[in-house]
Image (spheres, rainbow, N blue to C red):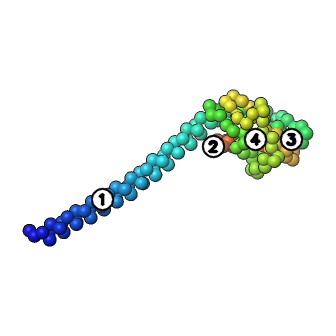
Amino acid sequence: MSAGSSATELIFFITSVIIAMSVVGALFMNVESITGASTISSKTLTEQLKTDITIINDPRIIYYSGGNYSFYVKNTGTQELVTDYVTVLLDGKMIPETDLNKTVDGSQTWKTGDVLIIKAKVTLSTGDHNLRIITQNGIEDTFPFTI
């Protein structure tokens, strides 16, 4: 065996170590990315499992006063919600925030057991309608009613 053959083997060994470290680095980055996505996904799922709402209006009697229909939604989950991120759909159309007044005892935080009062400035014809309330994390309740 000559010195040239030892130098060649050393170069091959160093090259294989560098390639192995590159592969390990790439795999580590992928595993880290998957772990981060799993953490975010589990936090979102936990929030969704803690969230529940129920529209508690009487479907035969919808309160109407001053050009506004009033809807009552109770937070029946264990997660506090923010009223700014509640979306209201009426007959499949989103009601703009400018036509809504959402209150919970004068607070922006919608705590467990509290009732959110939504006053919607809309024009409804006589007949069947469908109200859909969606929270910030996608939990919703649907309420069919008749005017």
Q: Mark 1 points at which residue?
A: 20
Q: Are marks 3 and 1 in contact (CB under 8 Å)?
A: no
Q: Name the residue under label 2.
A: 137
Instruction: Report the residue at 59% width, 39% height from top.
Output: 48
**Percent x, y for residue 47?**
58, 38
Query: Label 4, label 2: how many angstroms apart (C-alpha)?
Result: 22 Å
Q: Mark 4 points at which residue?
A: 144
Q: Are marks 1 and 2 in contact (CB under 8 Å)?
A: no
Please identify the quarter of the rendering in which residue 17 is found: bottom left
User: Please, what secondary structure does the residue beneath circle 2 have?
Assistant: loop
Q: Name the residue under label 3.
A: 68
Query: Label 3, label 2: how many angstroms apart (C-alpha)?
Result: 27 Å
Of the two numbered discs 3 and 1 on the same chain, state the one appearing first in sequence. Answer: 1
* Kind of residue at disc 3: Asn
Query: Label 1, label 2: how many angstroms apart (C-alpha)?
Result: 43 Å
Q: Is residue 130 left or right of residue 123?
A: left
Tell which tag, 3 or 4, sits nearer the viewer.
3
User: Please, what secondary structure does the residue beneath circle 4 have?
Assistant: strand
Of the two numbered discs 3 and 2 on the same chain, state the one appearing first in sequence. Answer: 3
**Percent x, y for residue 70?**
82, 37
* Kind of residue at disc 4: Pro
For the C terminus, the quadrant is top right
